[in-house]
Structures are given as C-alpha cells and as structure tokens.
Amino acid sequence: MYAVKVFVVERSLVFCYLAKPSVVKFSAKSFLTKTILKKMKITVVGAGNVGATAAQRIAEKELAHEIVLVDVVEGIPQGKGLDMYQSAPIELFDTKIIGTNGYDETANSDIVLITAGLPRKPGMTREDLLNMNADIVRKVTDSVVAKSPNAIIIVVSNPLDVMTYVAYIRSGFPANRVMGMAGVLDTARFRTFIAMEFGVSVQDVNAFVLGGHGDSMVPVAKYTTVAGIPIKEFLMMHYKDQAKADERLKALSDRARNGGIEIVNFLKSGSAYYAPSSASVEMIESIVKDRKRILPCCVRLTGQYGIDDVFVGVPVKLGKTGVEQILEINLDDEDLKALQKSANEVKQNCEKIKL
C-alpha cells in the first residue's frame, strides 16, 4: 500500500510516493534548490554591510552552490564568510561560503554582485562619491571579467547609475549582462511609506520608481496602486480632500527620493544595507530561477523613452540571461519629462569621469 503526498513547489505539483510515510520525509525547499546548487556560483565583491548581508540572504535562500565573498581588507571576508557558513547547520542551507582578498577563487562565477565602494556620509550626495568610487568599480570590474568572462554583473555601488555605466564600459559585456540595483530599492521604499501612511499591508501596495538613483528619481503615481486602487483615488478615499491628497502624494514621493539619506542621517555613520541587500537578492533570485520578474532596474537604454546610451532605471524582465526585455510603459508627459531629465543628469555625470 503506497501513500501519496502532493506538494506545490514553485506553482508545480510534485507527487511523492511513499512506501513508509512515517519514515520518509520530503523537503520542498531541498527539492527545489538541488538543481540550482549544482551549477550556480555567485561572487559578492565588498564584504561591508550591504555585501555581507546580501551573501547571507543568498545562502539562506540557497540560490547558489557556492558564494565567494571578496574584500580588500585582510581577514574581513574570511571571518564573515566563516561566520556565515557556521550558521548553515541552524538555517539549514548547504551553500558553501568562501572569503578571500583575491579573485582566483571567483573564477567562473555565474553572477557577480559589486557592492564595493565608499559609503555616503551625512551631507554627502551620491554625486560626491563619483570619482572616488569610479576608480574602485573600474578595478573590480577588470578583475571580475578576467576570471568570469560569462558572468552577469549587478552593480550596487553608488552613484549607482554611473557605476553601472563604468562596469559596462570596462567589462565589454553585452548590455543585457550588466545592470544596476536601484529601482527595486527605491520602489520598496515608496511602497513602505505608502503602507505606513494608510496602515495597510506592504503586500497590497504596488508601484514603480524610475529614473536615476538620486534626487531626480521618478515615483510614477500612474502605476502606483493600493489593492489595485490607483493611489490618487485611494488618497481621496482616505482624506476626502483634493488639496490634502495632493499634498500627501508629494510628501510620500519626496520621502522616497530621500529614503537613503534619511537613514544616513539617523545612523550618523554608515548607510542603509538591509533593504539594499534584499533588493539585490530579489534581482538575483529572478535570474537564478529564471522567474521572468518585471522589476525596475538600471539598464542601458537605446532609444526607449527618448533616451539613448544612458543607464537609468526602467521596468525590465529579468531571467536566466539577465535583462531579457526592456518595457516601455506609457508615461504621462510630466513623468516622461522627469525621466528624461533624470537620464540627462546621469549622462552629465558619466561625462565627468575618466574611463
């Protein structure tokens, strides 16, 4: 007599025939990740708060068979990597984690997450970091490409849009394999502030924040909803006053634009890393699992939205080959002009650096 158990794994049915149901156990997580573990290697460059937290999240989600954590400071990646690995028996993951100060161990990585760079300090804009971090990303990219010529590169270093451009030029990779993490984070912040405003679940808030990862980013009200209800309509339902609704929408948008510096000012020293690491891993997961997620990412535009040869945040489809499609959504004239203005600022900053 056989017992049959049915499990739903990634929206697929898995039938498990058990001769002795009381003895044999089935782990949906283990079943799902084993094929991933056999072939996926991910390198995280920069063992600071963002990089280390991202590495831990990747391991706990079992998105790779091996993670290599790289940093220039001797002992930091080795110590953090070992500490993470020792959490494996508790968190129940089999991902191998290696810490190193060189790039030999990163050879043949499938994905490289670049978080290396100097952090923002109070009073410092992302643009202030321009030349200092450009040199760091330039050197990192050269080292990465030499060891992993087929990798997909995701940049987190700030100023994000310019650093993604630097990685693209230095790598010589096709544009679909070089992208920046910004829109996922900025959108998450916008969604969080909206949920806080109305006291609703963040899961019921959907939005898009486009443009450069800075003061010129564009929270798009047209595509922002609460449980499917357009944000402007939801604000009117809540406040029953047009002037108040408009005021609160502007305040929420402004807070999203300043979401990073708000945290910097609280911390005094250092910057955000929990949300940035989560945003990075959401992109990685979509690539590793070929999920085809539609996410706002910093990518190279070639005429879309009237913007050419500039890296800026727009909705894209992410799959196993990287950026599989750039979505050109219909924007209001005001939002389109704001996006083009943001892209122009990115282009001007790119022109200031030497490659």
Image (cartoon, rainbow, N blue to C red):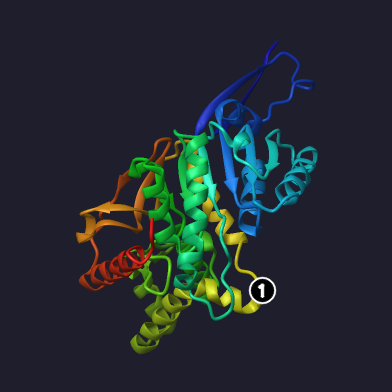
Residue 276 place in picture, x, y as percent: 55, 59
For the residue pair 208 and 128, the one nearer the viewer reads as: 128
Horizontally, residue 56 falls left or right of residue 213, namely right
Q: How many marks?
A: 1
**Which x, y percent locates residue 338?**
28, 72
Residue at image coords 31%, 68%:
348
Along the horizontal axis of the image, is 67 left or right of 137?
right
In the foreground, 315 or 137 = 137
* Quarter of the figure with residue 324: top left
- The structure residue drawn at horizontal position 40% and vertical position 87%, both measured from the top left corner, is 244
- Left or right, 278 with reference to 19: left
Q: Is residue 297 visible to us here?
A: no
Which residue ends up furthest to the top in the rendered image? Answer: 1
Work out whether 62 lies above or below 80: above
Give 158 or 28, whichever is nearer the viewer.
158
For label 1, the SS is: loop
| Residue 37 coordinates in the image, percent (x, y) | 61, 29
> Which residue has dot 1 on it?
269
Closest to the observer, 185 or 103: 103
Please rate how many residues cluster around mark 1, counting C-alpha atoms within 10 Å: few if below 14, some from 14 to 19, many from 20.
few
User: At x 34% / y 70%, what residue is drawn?
Assistant: 221
Q: Is residue 127 visible?
A: yes
Q: Position of residue 241 (x, y in %)?
A: 37, 87
* Quarter of the C terminus within the rendering: bottom left
Q: Quadrant of the N terminus?
A: top right
- What kind of residue is marked 1? Ser
Q: Quadrant of residue 217?
A: bottom left
Residue 175, by quadrant, is: top left
Q: Residue at x 73, y 52 (%)?
A: 76
